[in-house]
Amino acid sequence: SFTRRFSREAPAGLKRQAFVIQDSVQLPNSSGSARGAFIRTESNEIVILPGPPMEMETVFKEALKHISLPSATFSRTIGFVDLTEPEVEDFTEQMLSKFTDVKFVTRVRYYSGPTVILTANDESALEELCNLFTDRWNKYIYTTSGEELVDVVVRELRDRKLTISIAESCSGGRLSALLTSVPGVSTLFPGGIVSYSNKVKSSLLNVSENTLRQYGAVSEEVAFEMAAGTEILFGTDVGLSVTGIAGPSGGSDFKPVGLVCSGIRIGSSIKTYTDRFKGNRETIQLRGANTVIKRLWRLLWNEYYIK
């Protein structure tokens, strides 16, 4: 009891928690002292929950044992790369004119692309719809089961028994953080380096000082050599690099804030890219990191073919 535990009488406000509603089912609370209650009337089911979020979640799990749940529904989430939300919505609406019992909503995963979430009581209808989407947008779909793009990339690398490492500058570790958000990635990711200064780029990644002087740190030439340097430093099959100007200062007319150069090495083949992103410092860093993951997925999907 409260008195035995704290050596004083329980306050009146706490005593009120001992009252119960007649004919209610008491819902235990393993995270706190306030219990919940479930009440069933002729026309309604009522659940009373405590306010703190952690306690509310705990008690609601108890309530699910008593609530009359609706008939099961099924859901599929399709993720797209390099498509716009209007393109996805237009095609979805065309398809759903033939599947009137299926509902959908489109959402944008800000740094990867649009998704469409399909729900229905008939799982076979969702399977048929996913096949229609795949037939139409095959080269742009990375999942039909709601996975994050980086999870798909890590699975592709694991299936091909490829290791990966990273050399990044302007993204400040965000590319490595994105990759290591996937559980179990340590089996194929030995490490990454934030090579922020030119000195570190040269000494650890073997980026040529002549290349840095001639083209500058933010250039495809340097991104190329950074990606190549990951093989020297980490000995991996795949190497990613990012270098750019995240701002808000440091830009020029020739190399403005938001300019990001990146490289992807698969074996001995290296492809480099230049992008110009808008936004604040964090947005530019995140866009740079996620864009590299998108391009790596596309290269893996095309069986290492680099245009």
Image (cartoon, helix red, strand yellow):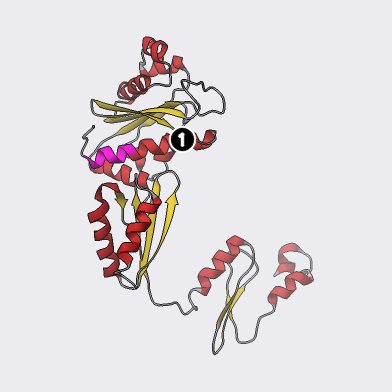
* Residue numbers of the magenta segment: 295-302
Q: Nearer the viewer, residue 66 or 263?
A: 263
Residue 168 seen in render = no
Q: Is residue 290 above or below residue 273?
A: below
- Report the front residue among 90 and 141: 90
Magenta-drawn stretch, dominant element (helix, strand or loop): helix
Is residue 243 or residue 17 the one in the foreground?
243
Q: Where residue 283 sits: x, y (%)? A: 50, 37
Horizontal relation, residue 306 to residue 194: left or right: left
Q: On the picture, is 201 further left or further right than 33? A: left
Question: What crowding class fits label 1: few (fewer than 14 Cα within 10 Å), some (14-19), or many (20 or more)?
Answer: many
Which residue occupies 30% across, 50% down? 141
Read off the residue under disc 1. Answer: 174
Instruction: Please report the residue visible at 35 percent of the width from the left and 54 percent of the height from the top.
Output: 88
Q: Where residue 209 sits: x, y (%)? A: 39, 10
Above or below residue 51? Residue 221 is above
Percent x, y of residue 215:
39, 15
Residue at coordinates 35% horizontally, 57% vertically from top-left? 90
